[in-house]
Image: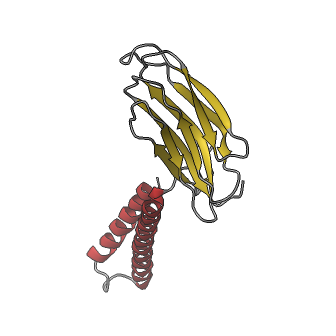
Amino acid sequence: MLGRLLQSKLARAAALAAAIVAGGYFAAPQAARAQADVLSAILLQFETLITNVGASLGSNIGTLATNSGRTPNLPGYPPGATALQGSSADVAAGSAVATLTSAASKTAYLCHFRCTGTGATTAVGADITVAGPTTSEIYIMGVVSGATAINAPVDVSYAPCLPASAVNTNITVTMASLGTGNLHAACAAEGYLTATAP
């Protein structure tokens, strides 16, 4: 909108100035010469304004690029927060651990985790423990019989996101071994890091 308005006014001013000059600037009466001078000044002001607007837009784009590593202000994510992700390896008959790693003077928050896996020779259950927050939480992964069968995933979201008990404290999601004969088990966690104390 601003660009079209500036272009329109600039074009009109240029046309008027060109018409006056074409008619003979120095041969024209003094009032006409004064009008041409005013129009020339207006043209110069518009050119300066356009240059400044372009520079400002370029500066803002540069700022956006600088901040592109930060998490946008999405639900559950405060402005300026840094996204965190942690994922275990794909383990067989062993513990799968996803870690959200904190940092000095920062607080880690857990927003979501998901644990998956295949079955085992004997159908049992396996604990999934969330540690790092003030109160640890335990969930159960139901394990089906058969090493190639697929367990129902355990998928948990927190709203609001769950903070660590203190600054510079990691949050871990640990799924115990799914049992003898298990071939695949994994956990993944997502959250954010912020300078705000829990």
From this view, report whether residue 140 is shown above or below residue 18: above
Would you say 156 lies left or right of 66 here?
A: right
Residue appearing at x 59%, y 52% in the figure: 170
Identify the coloring: secondary structure
Residue projecting furthest to the top: 145
Would you say 71 lies left or right of 35 here?
A: right
Nearer to us in this view, 154 or 97: 97
Is residue 73 visible in the rendered image? The answer is: no
Q: Position of residue 5 (x, y in %)?
A: 45, 57
Q: Position of residue 162 (x, y in %)?
A: 66, 43
From this view, report whether residue 181 is shown above or below residue 53: above
Quarter of the rendering containing residue 11:
bottom left
Would you say 22 lies left or right of 191 here?
A: left
Is residue 4 visible in the rendered image? The answer is: yes
Quarter of the rendering containing residue 94:
top left
From this view, report whether residue 143 is shown above or below residue 66: above
Nearer to us in this view, 128 or 40: 128
Nearer to us in this view, 65 or 193: 193
Nearer to us in this view, 103 or 185: 185
Q: Position of residue 82 (x, y in %)?
A: 54, 55
Q: Position of residue 67 (x, y in %)?
A: 48, 60
Residue appearing at x 58%, y 57% in the figure: 80
Residue appearing at x 39%, y 22% in the figure: 181
